[in-house]
Every structure is written in C-alpha cells, then in structure tokens.
Amino acid sequence: MNTLPDTASPLYEKVKDYILANIGTGKWSKDRKLPSENEFVAALGVSRMTVHRALRELTSAGFLIRLQGVGTFIAPPRPQSTLIEINNIAAEIVARGNRHRSEVLVLERITSTKELSLSFEFAKRAAIYHSVVVNFENDLPVQLEERFVNPSLIPDYDKQDFSKTATYDYLMQKTPVTEVEHIISAVPAHAETARHLAIDIGSCCLLLHRRTWTGAVVATISKLTYVGSRYSLGSRYSPSRKT
Amino acid sequence: MNTLPDTASPLYEKVKDYILANIGTGKWSKDRKLPSENEFVAALGVSRMTVHRALRELTSAGFLIRLQGVGTFIAPPRPQSTLIEINNIAAEIVARGNRHRSEVLVLERITSTKELSLSFEFAKRAAIYHSVVVNFENDLPVQLEERFVNPSLIPDYDKQDFSKTATYDYLMQKTPVTEVEHIISAVPAHAETARHLAIDIGSCCLLLHRRTWTGAVVATISKLTYVGSRYSLGSRYSPSRKT
DNA sequence: TATACATACATGTATATACTTTTAGGAACC
DNA sequence: GGTTCCTAAAAGTATATACATGTATGTATA
C-alpha cells in the first residue's frame, strides 16, 4: 500500500517528495485541496506527526497553504508584482489598483550616536533622524523601511507626514542626490521584522540596503525589507557597449 | 525555574525567542556553542521534542548550525560578498581570492518547444539552446544558472566550453545586446534547485530573471539562483536628476 | 607509537497519545 | 428567514518513548 519512493532519505522527506510530485501532475488541482492529515496517514501508512511535519515544511517553503480547521491547499502562483526602478512603493501599489497606507513606527532625532552601527563619517554629524515605516497594500504589510537621515542636508524632515508622503520621491526632490547604492540580498526574517510584517520568522525576504550621497557626504542610509512572497525588484536598461 | 516569557504564543516559539534573545546578549558567544538539547530540557522544563523543534527552525532560518554528534552553534555572520553589477560571478569569486569552478549539467539544442514555458516570440524560433550550469566557490555550489539562447543570434554557442568561460561576458561580447532586464526576487528553494546547490528545500535564495534583447528580438532568457546565505547583488549609480 | 574498538553523548527520526484551537456546517430555536 | 448553539473535522501543540546515526574520546591492543 505504501506508494512512497524506496530511497535512503527520511520518511518525512519521502512524503514531501510524494506530495510535491503529485502537485506537479495536477492530481489535486481541481479545487487545489489536498487530503487531510489522517487521509495521508491511511494512504501512506506513516504516523500523523510525520505527515504533519512534511506538510508543515512544504507550507513554510511556500508550496502549500494550511488553514486550521479547514484543510491544506496548493499555494497559488506568486504574484509577480514588480517594483520598477526600486523607488516608489506607494506609487507602485496604487498603480496596481490597490490601497496604500503606511504606518510610522519611529520618527525621532537621535542625539547620542553611541549605539548606532553606522559608518563614522555619517554618524558623527549628529543629530540624525531615525525613522521606521511599514507600508501596507490593502492592509497587508508588505515592506518595512528603516532610515537614517542627515538633517544638515534635509531641512524640515520632521515636519513631513510620512504616512502620506512617498518617502523616496520626497528625498530625491529635497536633496541634491548625486549617487545611490543598492545592495540586495535574500534573508530569512528576524523576529522583529517578522512581527512588523506579520510573517513567520525565517520567511524569505528581499533586503535592500540603500545609501544616497550628496557630493562626498552620505545623505541617507536605509534598510528596506520586502516580503519575499509578495515582491520582486525590477530594472531594465540599455548597456553602453564597449565593443 | 522556567525562564520563558509568559505570552500566548506556543512553547516552541517561546523557546526560539529565548534562544534568539540570549544569542543577542552574547551569552554563548565565547565558543559560539549552545547547550545541548537535554541541557535545554533541564533548564527550561519542556520536552526534548519541543527544544528540538525550536532549534531545528532556528537552524533552517539561518541563525544556528547543528552538527549531529557534535552540537549546536551560533551561525557566523553572513559574508557580504557583493556581486558588483550583476554580471560575472566567476571574476567576482576569483577577485575574492577563491577558487572558481563550474559544472555544466545540461547543454542541448531543443527542437520541440512544446514543453517550454517561454514567451511565444522567443520560443517559436526553435531550435533553442538550453543549458544549466552550477558555479562553485571553493567547491561549494553558490549559483545555478538556467539559460535559453537564441542560436540565430549567437553562432557557435555549442562549441564553447562553459566550464571555463564567463558566460555573461561571452554573451555580451558575441551578441549586440541592446537591452537587459533583471527581475530580482527572494524565493524559497525548490526541490531540484536545493539538490543542485546542496541546500535545504525552502532556504532563502536570490532569484534573478534576466532577459537580453538584440533590437526587438529576445536573445537570451536566464534564471539565476544564488544561495541567499552567500550572496548579495550590488549596484551603484548616479541618477539623472529631473529637478 | 599507532591503530582499533568501546563508549558516551550529541543530534536525527518515527511513533503513539492526548489535548487544544479553529472552522464549517447542520440543528434547534426565535 | 435569520440567529444561536452544537458537533464533527481539520490542523496545531506537547509529551514520552524508542531507536538510529554521527562524532569525539578514552582505552586496550598490536
């Protein structure tokens, strides 16, 4: 009765492979609903905990969605919502016909720079503005931005209403930015980030480190975290060919 | 004796929070080795399976490293190896003083395009070259590239030794690329990718979709997967200001 | 000295069991 | 018809137990 592959891997891995393979063939694609844990137990002859672990891991890997009291479903394909040019998340959300809202968690002027882990040439010109903002798309948190701003370059920063303003646009207009650097990485969500974005610890996130310069002076340092299951970053350009 | 927080979350989440918090304070930072599962059981008064689950999830989230028979250790900080300009991974690896090697998994000319999920205007000009290459840094697989190449634009593609050649450079030299598009996302690793890159299913990966054009014709379509725990993508540019 | 083995200890896997929490749906009631 | 309540079913959590597997280390032996 056991239809699992006869390999050397652990049982729960076999169950995962079995389920993945059957998702691939479209076996359960009619209503996208998988058998219950107990049905898997009966069909495969393994314990419920083993089935549960397999389903849990496939869920955290993004293949499945589980609803307590309801069942297990095949996850819909990821929406390829592309964030063109890595700049204005608010405009991007509105352009998709969705509702944008942001929540300012922190907006303060820092006078002590002891605990800041910033580059010295930036940190030494205290006071720095520190802000943390969550951006929502239809009330679902999708991005978290932590920002340090050099106030000598951006006057009236604290008078701005950042729950209304598209921050990047604002900064680009108010400051003579001469250079922008982006470092993009894929990281598992840490505890605090996960809490703010309402995702599980360890979920895949796109992490964008951004620094902007005005001349030789760093104007802003930001850390932008996008929920990996909801965002991509896009760019398109024409290379200057050296041939 | 129970030092866990008194919140409403599940026990294993409390244990995870407890461990994360103590990693933060540097409690175990001398040799980076954590107590054994049984020591946690004695200290926290929970079952070993609960401790095990907490440690396992923190491990798959990248915070810990576990060695069977040895113990549990705090994961070292992620090397910020930046891939400048998103192009030549081989040069990048060598520049870091490491050994580069690549392995060609697939190199074939496709004549039937039925099973290809490519854009029509590209797929219809069969035959297309399909190749899959893994790149290694010091024998550790770090990137997987799957590529479709339009042979009408790149003659002698199959005569090239791609285990030696920096592919992107090669293509940029051989073809009159007029435009490049990159879509970057953070995704959990699928089964096959995880196998090729020797990581767990569900690990965070940077996924780069790249299309290059020659005039109005798509010349290449590639899917590059970077192991999230080892790579970042970087860019730095001077914006043309509209003020 | 060096090899082989035994052992202790660490994590890894699998099961059985019990209970909790959430949800859907039907039954009873207004 | 609509509301409330009950119940079954589904996933979620927690524990105890057993055994498997991998590693380091000390000890006996060649």
Image (cartoon, coloured by chain):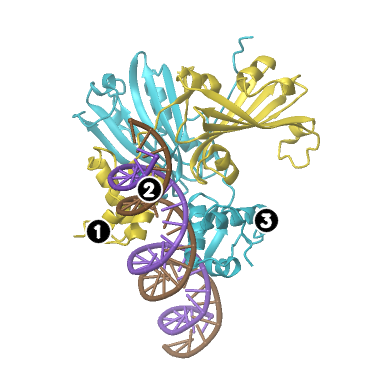
Chain colours: A yellow, B cyan, C purple, D brown
Identify the secondary structure beneath mark 3: loop
Rate crowding at label 3 as few (under 14), some (14 to 19) or many (20 or more) other CA atoms within 10 Å.
few
Type of amino acid under label 3: Gly
Separation (CA) of disc 1 from disc 3: 47 Å
Against A60, residue A14 (above or below) is below
**Observer able to see residue B126:** yes
Q: Residue A170: x, y in percent? A: 64, 18
Where is mark 3, residue-wise? B26
Query: Amino acid under label 1?
Result: Ala
Q: Which residue is mark 2?
A: A69
C-alpha separation, residue under disc 2 versus residue under disc 1: 19 Å
Q: Position of residue B133 (x, y in %)?
A: 36, 39
Viewer-side residue, A12 vs B192: A12
Q: Which residue is mark 1?
A: A42
Q: Residue at point 43% right, 32% down?
A: B208
**Towards the viewer: A192 or A236:** A192
Tell me the quarter of the image containing the N terminus of chain A. bottom left
